[in-house]
Image: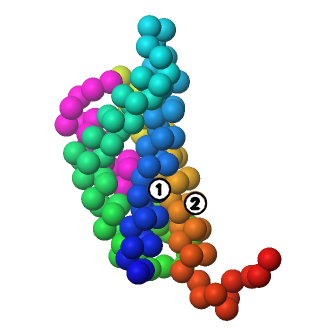
Amino acid sequence: MRVLKRLSVWFGETLCGAIILGLFSTVMLRVPEYSVAKLLGASLFWIIYVSGRTGYAFTTLICRLLWSSKKVLRYPVCAAALCIIHGLYYFLATDTGTPRGRFTMLTVGAFAAFVSTLAGSYVLLRWEQPRSEQAVI
């Protein structure tokens, strides 16, 4: 049951991070002849494809399943660092974008990874606490 909880939290974190990065790239790439929904859909597809292709999704999945620290900030910092490392790998391997665009996407990607995994870590910490330790509202 614990692995299933961690897996569902990882899936939610990954989806939220992709949505945040997709919204940012949709705003950045605003092309008048395309609708926002089409741009967002294309951005989400591309982000999920690249995160799978570079191994980011796999490494964060392994880290989330094996991470057992009660410190909420440790895993988000690790996920943001993994995002930067895999993003650098992608940009160096494909030689796409301008240096400024690469820096912006790496920064926003790390921010999205940090925020989504911070929320996920908090949810997972609350979810895995025994009922006797949780406050009753």
Q: Is residue 91 above or below residue 116?
A: above
Residue 2 is covered by the magenta coloring: no
Q: Is residue 122 above or below residue 70?
A: above
Find the magenta span and give its range. Answer: 80-97
Q: Looking at the rendered structure, which numbered label has been put on residue 70?
A: none
Task: Assign the magenta stretch its main secondary structure.
Answer: helix
Q: Residue 79, located in which quarter of the rendered image?
A: bottom left
User: Seen in the image, is 66 located left or right of residue 115?
Assistant: left
Pointers 1 and 2 in contact (CB under 8 A)? yes
First along the sequence among labels 1 and 2: 1
Mark 1 Cα shell of 10 Å, populated few (<14), some (14-19), many (≥20): many
Q: Residue 109: percent from the left, percent from the top?
A: 45, 43
Residue 20 position in % (x across, y down): 51, 40
Q: Residue at x 22, y 45 (%)?
A: 53
The stretch drawn in magenta includes residue 95? yes
Instruction: In the rendered structure, find residue 13 and report the number of the disc placed on it.
Output: 1
Q: Which residue is mark 2?
A: 119
